[in-house]
Image (cartoon, rainbow, N blue to C red):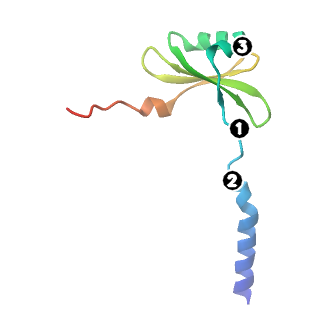
Amino acid sequence: MTTTKTFLTILALLALASPAFAKKNRKPATLVPWKDVPAQVQATIQNNAGTGKVREVQKETAANGVVFYCAEVKGADGKWIKVYVSDAGALMKTEPDNARNKRKHKPLFG
């Protein structure tokens, strides 16, 4: 009898705790053409891109409702970085895009 109660208690706790482990529902980012990116955001991205080329800009909304832009920049050295800029044009952060930097083209033959 006690093992049944213990089992049911554990089962109930797992059922109640499972939403806590689920990922938060987040809106997917939307690609924004460069001409539609606000001028102050463009200036901040270009200042932090250096000699690199901006390949893609996405508009995202954080969980607290803050709108920001994420630009993927390919540097002159071939390294990718991400530049995060607020809607007002303030730099939030820059970070290397490790997933893209790890991908290397490997020749099929030779």
Cβ atoms at labels 3 and 1 below 8 Å apart: no
Residue type (three-letter) at the residue carrying disc 2: Ala
Q: Amino acid at mark 1?
A: Lys
Quadrant that contains the N terminus: bottom right
Q: Nearer the viewer, residue 44 or 42?
A: 42
Residue indicated by mark 2: 22
The residue where tag 1 is placed is 27
Residue 9 quadrant: bottom right
Residue at numbered disc 3: 38
> What residue do we see at 76% from left, 37% from top?
63
Dot 3: element = loop
Please provide percent x and percent y for residue 71.
Answer: 60, 22
Where residue 93 appears, as percent x and y from the top left, is 64, 23
SS assignment at label 1: loop
Q: Residues within 10 Å of mark 1 (few under 14, many from 20)?
A: few
Of residue 50 and residue 71, the one placed in the foreground of this image is 71
Image point 52% across, 29% down: which residue?
Answer: 97
